[in-house]
Image (cartoon, grey):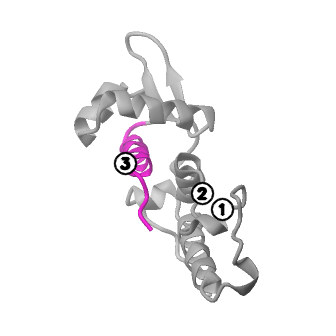
Amino acid sequence: MRLSSRSEYGLRALVALAHRDNALPVPLRVIAEEENISEQYLEQIFVELRRAGFVSSVRGAKGGYRLARGPQDIVVGDVVRLLEGSLAPMECLIEEGPGCVREDGCQTRLVWQRVQSSIEDALGRMTLAEAAGAPVPSVAN
């Protein structure tokens, strides 16, 4: 499974914001330059990130974007799902999709379900703070 550049660039931009003082908005141009991403492409991604409540925008000469909530409260899986639409590795597992005519007798369906579950689990447990390199709290077993 390969994720699109939308997820890659969206996460890179959010990590860049997580490394900054959230009180100061960052112009999209600055993020685009630092991350070597097309500003126009990043604008399209940030429209979705803003609508979903991951970032907020400030208009004006000193405007830009900042995280709408703390990086510890933003789950990477939620961002990827927003930008990708689905984490299903196969078309037949997409809930809104047409399904699969072989679903009942498919010999490989369990494989793809486990792959999807592993991806969702890994991304669902990771926060933007962790992705940005912030110390990760230990988990008691």
Instruction: Give neighbour class at mark 3: few <14, some 14-19, many 20+ (Cα, 10 Å).
Output: some
Q: Residues within 10 Å of mark 2 (few under 14, many from 20)?
A: some
Q: Nearer the viewer, mark 1 or mark 3?
A: 1
108 is higher (above) or lower (below) than 16: below
- For label 1, the residue is 94
Q: What secondary structure do most residues of the magenta stretch adopt?
A: helix
Identify the element where label 3 is drawn: helix
Residue type pointed to by label 3: Arg
Q: Secondary structure at mark 1?
A: loop
x and y percent of residue 128 in the render? 48, 54
Left or right? Give the position of 108 relative to 96.
left
User: Which residue lies under the disc numbered 3?
Assistant: 12
Q: Residue reaching furthest top?
A: 61
> Dividing the image into 4 quarters, which one contains the C terminus?
bottom right
Marks 2 and 3: CB-CB under 8 Å?
Answer: no
Q: Secondary structure at mark 2?
A: loop
